[in-house]
Image: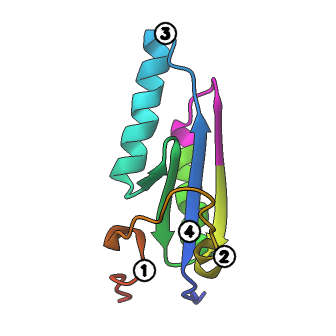
Amino acid sequence: MSLRYRIMRLLIFFDVPTLTAEDRRNYRKLHQTLVKEGFLMIQESVYVRVLMNKQSANFLEERIQKVAPVRGTVQSMIVTEKQYSEIKFLAGKNIEDVRNSDERMVVI
């Protein structure tokens, strides 16, 4: 099985309650997992990560699903780098951050 390298982006969108102590604990666990897995916050409750291919994105999506709280909504979307680069800013401006690009990605 050969893996093709087609840079993908995995986006995670969530809206989870923080009313009870358990809700806040579940939120923190999700947030900490996203940060630990290398996701960057691009908007409040919207995180993105650059990945090598769709298989890697699917694998990471499953890992995030395991820590997703039962209450609330957690959604994911996998897009190609080309699709992601077509994002239009209707208000505000793009923040150039080398961590949010595939420029430093090394394939071994």
Are the residues tagged 2 and 4 within 8 Å (C-beta)? Answer: yes
Q: Amino acid at mark 2?
A: Gln
For disc 1, the neighbor class at 10 Å (few under 14, some 14 to 19, many from 20) is some
Are the residues tagged 3 and 4 within 8 Å (C-beta)? Answer: no
Q: Which comes sooner in the sequence, label 3 or label 2? A: 3
Residue at the spot of label 1:
102
Labelled disc at residue 9: 4
For disc 4, the neighbor class at 10 Å (few under 14, some 14 to 19, many from 20) is many
Q: Amino acid at mark 1?
A: Asp
Distance from disc 3 to disc 4, alpha carbons, whole Å, reads 32 Å
Distance from disc 4 to disc 1, alpha carbons, whole Å, reads 10 Å
Q: Amino acid at mark 3?
A: Thr
Are the residues tagged 3 and 2 within 8 Å (C-beta)? Answer: no
Residue at the spot of label 3:
20
Q: Quadrant of the C terminus?
A: bottom left
For disc 2, the neighbor class at 10 Å (few under 14, some 14 to 19, many from 20) is few
Distance from disc 3 to disc 2, alpha carbons, whole Å, reads 38 Å
The magenta-colored residue range is 66-75
Residue at the spot of label 2:
83
In which quarter of the view is residue 68 placed?
Answer: top right
Secondary structure found at label 1: loop
